[in-house]
């Protein structure tokens, strides 16, 4: 399951992001002495093996105009949380949604959904729609608004 030399070099070449060019895998491959197809195949193999979890865009919501960002937290019936979380995660305005373990008596929430809007009122409207979807399965909720922009990074390998 350990990466070989080419895998490590691909990770190092992409860990700060793919090049913003029309053919990013070819650009990475050219820098590493490999083809773009080899880069794609290696990344897919690393995903399949669980060496990396995902390849995806990491938007800066603030720069896109979404300045009201809040983690909505929900106390949802345990026997419905997975089904309802899937539905919530598919909603527009929700960038990620996941289940977490409760930490009673201090923290009762077991479903989290990150909401993005151009205003707090817009985020509150989204939360209201989610509350309607959850219905009686939801016992309590809150929204924890972002107060700072944190740098998002993925896997980092040390330089050789």
Image (cartoon, rainbow, N blue to C red):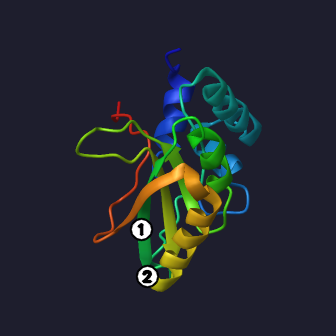
Q: Is residue 151 left or right of residue 116?
A: left
Tell me residue 14's x, y (percent).
52, 46
Residue under circle 2?
120
Q: Residue at x 72, y 42 (%)?
A: 36
Position of residue 12 relative to residue 137, above or below, is: above
Position of residue 97 relative to residue 159, above or below, is: below
Q: Is residue 122 left or right of residue 105?
A: right
| Farthest-out residue, left | 106
| Farthest-out residue, front | 136
Tell me residue 92's x, y (percent).
66, 67
> What is the quadrant of residue 125 in the picture?
bottom right
Q: Is residue 24 left or right of residue 66?
A: right
Q: Residue at x 33, y 34 (%)?
A: 158
Mark 2 falls on what kind of element?
A: helix
Tell me residue 103's x, y (percent).
29, 38
Q: Residue at x 62, y 54 (%)?
A: 89
Q: Which mark is residue 70?
A: 1
First-in-chain label (2 vs 1): 1
């Amino acid at each position: 399951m350990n990466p070989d030399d080419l895998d490590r070099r691909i990770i190092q070449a992409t860990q700060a992001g793919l090049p913003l060019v029309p053919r990013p895998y070819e650009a990475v491959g050219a820098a590493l002495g490999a083809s773009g197809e080899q880069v794609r195949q290696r990344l897919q193999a690393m995903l399949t093996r669980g060496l990396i979890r995902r390849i995806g865009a990491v938007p800066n919501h603030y720069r896109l105009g979404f300045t009201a960002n809040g983690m909505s937290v929900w106390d949802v019936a345990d026997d419905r949380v997975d089904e309802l979380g899937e539905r919530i995660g598919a909603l527009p305005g929700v960038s990620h949604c996941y289940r977490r373990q409760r930490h009673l008596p201090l923290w009762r929430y077991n479903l989290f959904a990150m909401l993005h809007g151009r205003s707090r009122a817009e985020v509150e409207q989204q939360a209201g729609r989610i509350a309607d979807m959850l219905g009686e399965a939801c016992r309590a909720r809150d929204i924890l608004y972002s107060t700072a922009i944190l740098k998002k990074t993925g896997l980092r390998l040390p330089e050789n």
